[in-house]
Image (cartoon, rainbow, N blue to C red):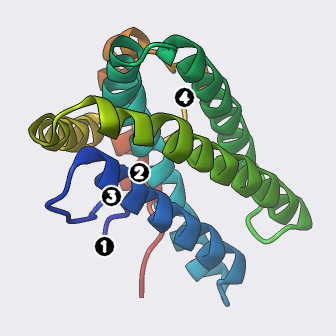
């Protein structure tokens, strides 16, 4: 199962919150994996979901929130800083042996930052977006997010947090990421 395969008929907020739940589950699964192969597989799923989820938020949700909500720009700037930090941490952790204590420490730091970021989004951004937009618009945004995720890079790209940067760099990065994934995807038994 692909990490982004979350089926919902609800709006974009519900869809993104369901992905946050899956991210929490994947962090726990990486930490508790009984074998190196399972740990590698779960980390692969986690990295992929984090990458496509953040790209879609940066391309679709954050710009819309900035336009629709009175103090949206300030809130989005804080979220983008958190996302950039997480992307740097995620890129850094990929260079570490998955069975090392260093990986465990870096994963714990990443988890803490990502989960705090998810809480900020849910309480400061998603709730307000839901109150500002009509249900049919939230459903259309869900479709736009799903489309953006299908085209998004599958690996972290620190420094690419704006909608314009994602449009410029995203397609090339996505193509390269998917080629790397095809070569390095963990085998499942």
The answer to which of marks 1 and 4 sits earlier in the sequence is 1
Q: Can you give x and y, in whole percent of width and height, for residue 172 in the image?
A: 33, 22
Quadrant for residue 87, please give it.
top right
| Residue assigned mark 3 | 4
Q: Nearer the viewer, mark 2 or mark 3?
A: 3
Label 2 vs label 3: CA separation?
15 Å
In the image: residue 95, left or right of residue 148:
right
| Residue assigned mark 2 | 181
Q: Nearer the viewer, mark 1 or mark 2?
A: 1
| Residue assigned mark 1 | 1
Q: Is residue 17 visible?
A: yes
Asked whether disc 1 touches disc 2, contact meaning CB atoms under 8 Å apart, the reply is: no
Asked whether disc 4 touches disc 2, contact meaning CB atoms under 8 Å apart, the reply is: no
Label 4 vs label 2: CA separation?
15 Å
Q: Can you give x and y, in whole percent of width and height, for residue 134 in the image?
A: 16, 35
Asked whether disc 2 touches disc 3, contact meaning CB atoms under 8 Å apart, the reply is: no
Asked whether disc 3 touches disc 4, contact meaning CB atoms under 8 Å apart, the reply is: no
Label 1 vs label 2: CA separation?
15 Å
Q: Nearer the viewer, mark 3 or mark 1?
A: 3
| Residue assigned mark 4 | 157
Residue 11, compared with residue 126, is above or below; it is below
Label 1 vs label 4: CA separation?
24 Å
SS type, badge 2: helix
Q: Nearer the viewer, mark 3 or mark 4?
A: 3
The answer to which of marks 4 and 2 sits earlier in the sequence is 4
Asked whether disc 1 touches disc 4, contact meaning CB atoms under 8 Å apart, the reply is: no
Q: Can you give x and y, in whole percent of width and height, for residue 67 in the image?
A: 34, 12
- Give the class, few, some or many, for how many residues have Cα within 10 Å of label 4's Cα (few <14, many ≥20): some
- Give the class, few, some or many, for how many residues have Cα within 10 Å of label 3's Cα (few <14, many ≥20): some
- Give the class, few, some or many, for how many residues have Cα within 10 Å of label 2's Cα (few <14, many ≥20): some
Q: Quadrant of the N terminus?
A: bottom left
């Amino acid at each position: 199962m692909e990490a982004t395969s979350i089926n919902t008929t609800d709006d974009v907020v519900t869809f993104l919150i369901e992905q946050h739940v899956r991210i929490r589950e994947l962090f726990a699964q990486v930490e508790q994996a009984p074998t190196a192969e399972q740990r590698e597989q779960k980390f692969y799923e986690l990295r992929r979901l984090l990458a496509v989820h953040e790209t879609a938020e940066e391309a679709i949700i954050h710009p819309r929130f900035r336009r629709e909500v009175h103090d949206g720009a300030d809130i989005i700037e804080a979220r983008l800083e958190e996302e950039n930090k997480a992307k740097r941490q995620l890129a850094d952790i990929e260079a570490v042996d998955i069975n090392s204590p260093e990986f465990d420490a870096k994963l714990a730091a990443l988890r803490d930052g990502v989960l705090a970021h998810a809480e900020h989004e849910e309480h400061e951004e998603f709730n307000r977006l839901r109150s500002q937009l009509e249900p049919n618009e939230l459903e259309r945004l869900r479709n736009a997010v799903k489309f953006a995720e299908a085209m998004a890079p599958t690996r972290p790209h620190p420094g690419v947090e704006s909608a314009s940067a994602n449009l410029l760099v995203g397609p090339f990065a996505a193509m390269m990421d998917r080629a790397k994934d095809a070569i390095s995807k963990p085998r499942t038994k």
